[in-house]
Image (tube, rainbow, N blue to C red):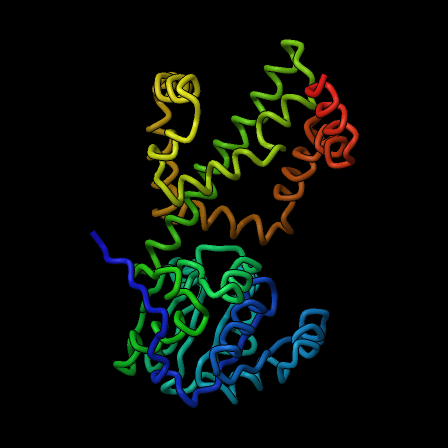
């Protein structure tokens, strides 16, 4: 089994004196830039003149164009969305890279599927926090850190591993624990979560809503029970803290028996084959080809899927619950 590496006081000597250019000042970019600056690194933000660059300037970072940021820094964080990365890389970065620089990613997609090919004389590494951007910052400020995957795809300098571990430490990830992986493994696991685990959960919740409301249960009560109370979020937290099955001891015996005795009954027998087919389409490149065609088409199917999801009646129930009226009514009923 792989070791999880922890270091409360990481060795940053591999990045000492090296400027870091953050390209993409979104949720991840902002949090990682702030954390690295707080750790003593010199950070410049490169981008186009938009709201994110203005925010970086307001946060006190020197800002410049992407190409100028690449020129002045020796470490480049490419933190733009996957479908934007390759265009920016081709237009503003590729021809300006020089020997000895380090190109860092937070997700391996474009390297894994060959949309970005780096020169042979630079290091290509990855620090991939397993946390949304705001969480990366909040955990760091609180004295902790987000767990992360770390990987080296190309070690031209012979110092790629000390560099990636120093970057992970500067972001705060070695406080939360880092796991050595590869660009391929990180990408394929991430896509599997997005295409198998989360679709299963969303479909289960919407199907349950449809079945239970057709049986006459109050829509607001169904949504509150299923997820709107945030109880499932707490259960997921306890899964991470205690273990998938160990956390069941926090529930009533009725709950434990109902959950464990029905595990083998609630999914169709061929569900395993669906999961196997999903990872096959990811590893073969079938999905990346599909997503590339979708991008080239102007995201027509993407927009259709979002529009269809917004039409589901569960959205109206959620709006009512968020307004407070339904939750107040349920609380009043429960107190009688």
The quadrant in which residue 296 appears is bottom right
* Residue 84 horizontal/vertical position (percent): 57, 63
As drawn, the residue found furthest toward the top would be: 215
Rendered view: 156 above or below 293: below
Query: Does residue 249 appear left or right of residue 95 in this picture?
Result: left
Residue at the image position 43 percent from the left and 27 percent from the top: 251
Counting labels gives 0
Q: Where does the image place residue 321, in percent across and percent down from the top left? A: 73, 32
Please tell me whether residue 150 is drawn above or below residue 212 in the rendered image. Answer: below
The answer to whether residue 45 is above or below residue 150 is below
Q: Who's the residue at 43% across and 22% down the image?
A: 252
Task: Using the image as rendered, state which of residue 312 and residue 16 is in the foreground.
Answer: 16
Residue located 57% across and 27% down the image: 226
Q: Is residue 148 left or right of residue 27?
A: left
Q: Report the residue that reaches farthest toward the left.
A: 1
Residue 261: x %, y % from top left: 35, 17
219 in relation to 287, above or below: above
Residue at the (62%, 44%) spot, across then down: 302
The C terminus - image quarter: top right
């Amino acid at each position: 089994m792989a070791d999880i590496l922890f270091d409360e006081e990481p060795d940053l000597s591999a990045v000492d004196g090296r400027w870091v250019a953050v390209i993409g000042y979104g949720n991840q970019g902002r949090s990682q830039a702030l954390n690295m600056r707080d750790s003593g690194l010199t950070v410049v933000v490169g981008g186009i003149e938009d709201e994110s660059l203005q925010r970086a300037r307001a946060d006190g970072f020197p800002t410049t164009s992407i190409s100028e940021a690449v020129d002045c820094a020796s470490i480049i964080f490419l933190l733009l969305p996957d479908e934007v990365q390759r265009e920016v890389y081709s237009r503003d970065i590729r021809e300006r890279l020089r020997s000895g620089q380090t190109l860092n990613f937070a997700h391996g997609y474009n390297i894994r599927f060959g949309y970005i090919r780096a020169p042979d004389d630079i290091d290509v590494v990855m620090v991939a926090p397993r946390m949304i951007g705001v969480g990366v910052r909040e955990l760091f400020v609180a004295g902790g850190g987000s767990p992360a995957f770390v990987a080296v795809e190309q070690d031209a300098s012979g110092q790629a591993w000390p560099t990636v571990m120093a970057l992970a430490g500067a972001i705060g990830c070695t406080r939360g624990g880092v796991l050595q992986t590869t660009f391929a493994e990180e990408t394929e696991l991430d896509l599997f979560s997005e295409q198998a685990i989360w679709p299963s959960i969303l479909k289960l919740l919407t199907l349950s809503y449809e079945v239970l409301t057709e049986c006459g249960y109050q829509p607001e009560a169904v949504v509150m029970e299923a997820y709107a109370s945030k109880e499932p979020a707490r259960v997921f937290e306890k899964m991470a803290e205690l273990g998938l099955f160990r956390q069941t001891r926090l529930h009533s015996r009725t709950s434990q028996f109902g959950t464990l005795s029905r595990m083998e009954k609630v999914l169709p027998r061929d569900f395993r084959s669906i999961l196997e087919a999903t990872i096959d389409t990811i590893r073969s490149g079938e999905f990346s080809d599909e997503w590339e065609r979708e991008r080239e088409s102007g995201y027509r199917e993407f927009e259709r899927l979002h529009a269809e999801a917004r039409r589901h009646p569960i959205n109206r129930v959620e709006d009512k619950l968020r307004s407070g009226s339904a939750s107040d009514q349920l609380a009043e009923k429960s107190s009688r």
